[in-house]
């Protein structure tokens, strides 16, 4: 993940980041888990519709990871999670990851709902 590289470059850990970004990272990890589940399901069924959803989710993950990495790269070394030190920079990462989760969840729900019928 790109954001891990940025954390290492800055000498930060996830716990040093604002709570919102920590939540975004947790959501990104959930997306990775969902992707792995979808890949396992595809390996069993070879359903082309599921493959399209996997491709879309992979793109969303890459985009969210890039946004988080971009935010981390913008943080100065003097930054602390409590807001002291350098000025915090706000971003729309939370909205982006939240929207991606919503779309992925609805897509998976619709896929499996149709599969039951």
Image (cartoon, rainbow, N blue to C red):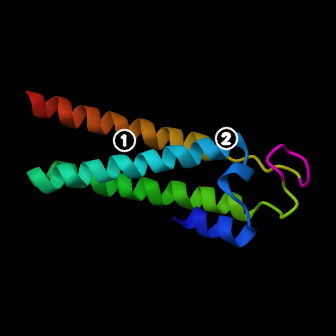
Q: Which residue is mark 1?
A: 104
**Residue that appears at 53% across and 58% down:** 65
Instruction: Give neighbour class at mark 2: few <14, some 14-19, many 20+ (Cα, 10 Å).
Output: few
**Residue that appears at 21% across and 53% down:** 40
- 34 in magenta: no
The answer to whether one can see residue 56 in this image is: yes
Q: CA distance from mark 1 to mark 2?
A: 20 Å
**Residue 51 shown left or right of residue 81 in the figure:** left
In the rendered image of this protein, does residue 52 appear above or below residue 8? above
Element assignment for label 2:
helix
In the rendered image of this protein, does residue 19 appear above or below residue 73? above
Which of the marked residues, 1 or 2, is nearer the chain's N terminus? 2
Residue 95 spot, x, y in % from top left: 58, 40
Element assignment for label 1:
helix
Q: Nearer the viewer, residue 67 or 7?
A: 7
**Residue 90 shown left or right of residue 36 in the figure:** right
Residue 42 spot, x, y in % from top left: 17, 53
**What is the span of residues highlighted in magenta in the rendered image?**
80-86
**Residue that appears at 66% across and 53% down:** 14
Quarter-of-image position of residue 7 = bottom right
The answer to whether the residue labelled 1 contacts the one labelled 2, judged by CB atoms less than 8 Å apart, is no
Residue 15 spot, x, y in % from top left: 69, 49
Q: Which residue is mark 2?
A: 20
Of tags 1 and 2, the one toward the viewer is 2
Instruction: Give neighbour class at mark 1: few <14, some 14-19, many 20+ (Cα, 10 Å).
Output: many
The answer to whether one can see residue 92 in this image is: no
Examine the residues drawn in magenta and state their main secondary structure: loop
Q: Nearer the viewer, residue 68 or 110?
A: 68
**Residue 45 shown left or right of residue 38 in the figure:** left
**Residue 18 shown left or right of residue 110 in the figure:** right
State the residue lying farthest toward the right: 85
Residue 5 spot, x, y in % from top left: 61, 70
């Amino acid at each position: 993940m790109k954001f891990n590289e940025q954390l290492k470059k800055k000498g930060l850990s996830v716990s040093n980041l604002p709570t919102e970004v920590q939540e975004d990272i947790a959501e990104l990890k959930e997306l990775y888990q969902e992707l792995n589940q979808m890949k396992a399901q595809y390996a069993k069924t070879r359903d082309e519709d599921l493959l399209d959803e996997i491709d879309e989710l992979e793109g969303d993950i890459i985009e969210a990871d890039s946004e988080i990495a971009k935010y981390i790269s913008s943080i100065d070394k003097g930054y602390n999670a409590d807001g002291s030190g350098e000025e915090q920079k706000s971003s729309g990462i939370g909205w982006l990851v939240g929207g991606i989760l919503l779309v992925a969840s609805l897509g998976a729900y619709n896929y499996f709902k149709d599969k039951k019928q």
